[in-house]
Image (cartoon, grey):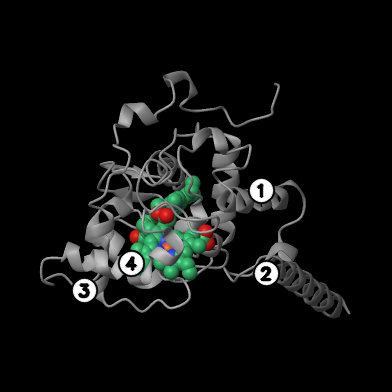
């Protein structure tokens, strides 16, 4: 009798455990596309939802607008709010951090990486650590990594789906050919003057990414164009992508001087707590 009761108890415990696990899994599917209905309950879910909005409307949303100095949103380059598996995807990115950053010469957190993008790609001011945009965007990106194995990156601050480098050893990029290709393949949306239209963002000039951004490097822009542009027919060959990248990055864009993009010292970090004792 005793043994029977014990067996029954452990069977119940297993069932309970399994249903808890299943309930958790059901709430957090690994990075697919629009998961708005499956966000975790309560303030965490609301924070993740805010993070996604900030990624989509970075330059216009009241929470992030003060920290952005151009017309770009995170989704301008991390297509479909970072859920496009090819174009600088956010899927799985949280598993790579903390990571070694050759540029920073430090081990950095995902929060650092997110905040640095405001200074460079978005040509703005670094939001304080622990501030609302920092917490919300990190929550959103982390949510897109649910169920993926942790693999901190000891070489560079990049996740498992980061944009593959193009083969080196191609001929010197041909800027003039790049200009011709730009007119044929890009100007219908981004304009002959590079200033974009109501949907396509500017690709050079004061409202574009600055010289400190990842895309300001010709090999990085070429690698990204190869997998991301034109959005509906991503078929540039590596050498075409290099030629166009050399042309686009030869045109003027904001200079980058680090001090001009850091907030005053007292605003560099925030105590992320509502505790009053
Ligand atoms: C001008 C284009 C551009 C904009 C705008 C931009 N990024 Fe990025 N970002 C990149 C590129 C390119 C990379 C490198 C991607 C790679 O190597 O796969 C990158 C890398 C990252 C990474 C690291 C990804 C990884 O694989 O570990 C994070 C996180 C990130 N960006 C967050 C943001 C956030 C948040 C914003 C908005 C505040 C933003 N980025 C705006 C172009 C951009
Ligand atoms: C059909 C219109 C269209 C075409 C053609 C197109 N783009 Fe884009 N491009 C976009 C849109 C829209 C975005 C922003 C993505 C978003 O917000 O979803 C974008 C984003 C970009 C970005 C990152 C944001 C920025 O402005 O810096 C670059 C760089 C870029 N495109 C370059 C190019 C180049 C180079 C070509 C030609 C090979 C090209 N695009 C062709 C529509 C287009």
At numbered mark 2, what does the secondary structure look like: helix, strand or loop?
Answer: helix
The crowd level at tag 2 (other Cα within 10 Å; few <14, some 14-19, many 20+) is few
Residue assigned mark 4: 183
Instruction: Give how far apart the Cα atoms at labels 2 and 1 are.
Output: 22 Å
The location of residue 222, given as percent across then percent down, is: 28, 65
At numbered mark 1, what does the secondary structure look like: helix, strand or loop?
Answer: helix
Q: Is residue 95 above or below residue 60?
A: below
* Residue 105: quadrant of the picture: top left
Disc 4 within 8 angstroms of ligand 2 (CB):
no
Taking the spot 58% from the left edge, 69% from the top edge, the residue there is 30
Judged left or right of residue 117, residue 22 is right
Confirm or deny contact between disc 2 and disc 1 (CB under 8 A). Answer: no
Total numbered labels: 4
Judged left or right of residue 143, residue 41 is right
Residue assigned mark 2: 25
Nearest to N terminus: mark 4 or mark 2 = 2
């Amino acid at each position: 009798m005793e043994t029977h009761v014990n067996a029954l108890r452990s069977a119940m415990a297993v069932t309970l455990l399994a249903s808890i696990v299943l309930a958790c899994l059901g709430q957090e599917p690994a990075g697919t596309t629009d998961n708005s209905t499956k966000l975790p309950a309560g303030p965490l879910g609301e924070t993740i939802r805010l993070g996604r909005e900030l990624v989509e409307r970075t330059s216009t949303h009241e929470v992030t607008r003060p920290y952005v100095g151009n017309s770009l949103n995170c989704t301008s380059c991390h297509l479909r709010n970072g859920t496009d598996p090819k174009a600088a995807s956010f899927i799985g990115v949280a598993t790579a951090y903390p990571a070694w950053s050759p540029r920073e010469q430090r081990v950095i957190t995902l929060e650092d990486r997110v905040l640095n993008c405001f200074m460079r790609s978005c040509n703005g001011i670094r939001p304080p650590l622990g501030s609302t945009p920092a917490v919300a965007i990190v929550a959103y990106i982390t949510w897109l990594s649910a169920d993926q194995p942790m693999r901190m990156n000891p070489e560079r601050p990049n996740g498992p789906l980061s944009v593959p480098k193009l083969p080196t050893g191609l001929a010197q990029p041909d800027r003039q050919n790049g200009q011709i290709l730009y007119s044929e393949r890009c100007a219908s949306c981004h304009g002959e003057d590079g200033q974009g239209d109501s949907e396509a963002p500017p690709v050079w000039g004061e409202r574009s990414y600055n010289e400190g951004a990842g895309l300001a490097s010709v090999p990085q822009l070429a690698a990204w164009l190869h997998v991301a542009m034109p959005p509906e027919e991503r078929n540039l060959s590596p050498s075409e992508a290099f030629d166009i990248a050399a042309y686009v990055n030869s045109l003027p864009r904001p200079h980058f001087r680090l001090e001009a993009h850091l907030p005053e010292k007292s605003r560099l970090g925030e105590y992320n707590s509502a505790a009053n004792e």
